[in-house]
Image (cartoon, rainbow, N blue to C red):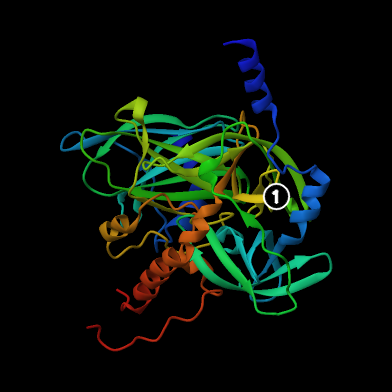
Amino acid sequence: MNRLRGITLLLLPAVLAACAAPKRPVIVPYVAPASGKVAKIQLRSAALFGTGAIFSFADSANCSTPRLVTSTSKPGEALLSGTTIPADVPQTFLFTHRIQAGKVCGVLVTFKPAAEKNYALFMTTATVDTCSVNILDITDPVAAKTEQHSFQRRPSANGVETGNYCLSADIDAELAKTRKLNRSGMQMSDLKSLLPPAPAETGAKP
Amino acid sequence: MKLPALMLSCLFLAAPTANAMEPDQLFKQIAPSVWLVRTFDSGSVPTGSGSAVVVEPRRLITNCHVLSKAASFVLVKDKLSFKGKLEYVDLERDLCMVSVTDEKFDAPPVKRINAQSLVVGQRVVTLGNPRALEMTLSDGLISRLQYDDDQKIEAIQTSAPFSPGSSGGGLFDLEGRLLGITQRVAVGTGMQNLNFALPAEWLDDLPARSKEQLDAWYASQRKPSR
């Protein structure tokens, strides 16, 4: 329990940055569903420079109620865990990598697991600047393939940025729009200052 | 296999590309087309740097993440600096095209080659600005080709080293033709020299994909907030 408390304090800035909830989130351990449709998931990273943790959210659309799925206890370890998750409903995970005090990168990833499938989430890069996640459908391990409908976003570059990147009016619509993993790990709003102004709305289309 | 056939095979494998250049010649040819991107926040404070390659007259390709959260950016080479403008955005592929309106910008566009013709083991070079160290040339091999579900190359893995700031630079064959846009490095304990570039022919899809993504974003901005 002491370890969980330590992790909670350690990673609180990242969780707060990821989901700027008005209240300080209470982080409890993740508990796999006991019934209903489920999928299996493996959560992995290479050995990290610092310490890492993976959270899932009870409310995937709003990133509320973070639950700790797994974490490393000291630098140099890899994230290595497996569990079951509810299927046929969107699931959001937050990967965090804390390299040193004030240097945290995180990535939020959302996808909709299908029942009876087996997935693997890999944190593919783990520097202060870039954290990204690959999701593979490994139901057939020999023919593992990238999950086609997922989206990820970086809540912060260094753990200091705030803003609710999870809030989504229609998470299903967001997932449907995605064709591939977002390689940039960005949202269009990250280029807001550089984008040309929105074209003026024209009359009704025929 | 008979000896003459074996010798011919060996000769073919060892033969350089038809118009392969020596590294110094290659650098001379492609260097004018690779620029440093310097980004600034709204207070004109430098926030980061990357690379960009001239692919059309006064138009350069870079990675979108190079421009992330920037309020403005310039293209820099030697002591020249030109204000840049964002033209096309494909966040899903991390490709952004930028332009320079100043007609004094006369850097030559590079030639391109379809990455689908690549083979593992082929020699390549990268040119970019790692850590803002302007115009750093490195060489290596095509280490692996990553295919999508349609059996088209979606990532070019190379042993030619990248570093932060290399993003948006060019991966070239020995004839100086652009094969890919250097994008990311897999890092972590136990990983070495795993560098990835995006196939150059994705540039052809950029205007249409940019329109689609921007239209969706502008539409989402027009929706009343909850």
Residue B133 in sight from this viewpoint: no
Quarter of the image with the C terminus of chain B is bottom left
Q: Is residue A106 left or right of residue B213?
A: right
Q: Does residue A62 lie above or below A87 as drawn? A: below
- Residue A1 position, x and y percent, is 42, 33
* Res. A177 image quadrant: bottom left
Whether residue A83 is visible here, answered yes or no, is: yes
Name the residue at 35% across, 53% down. A179
Nearer to me, B30 or A133: B30
Badge 1: few (under 14), some or many (20 or more) residues near its Cα, within 10 Å?
many
**What residue did someone put label 1 on?**
B176
Secondary structure of residue under mark 1: loop
Is B47 above or below relative to B170? below
Residue occupying the far top of the picture: B2
Which amino acid type is shown beneath numbered disc 1? Answer: Gly
Residue B158: x percent and y percent? 62, 38
The quarter of the picture where residue B225 lies is bottom left
Check the image and report above or below for B32 versus B115: below
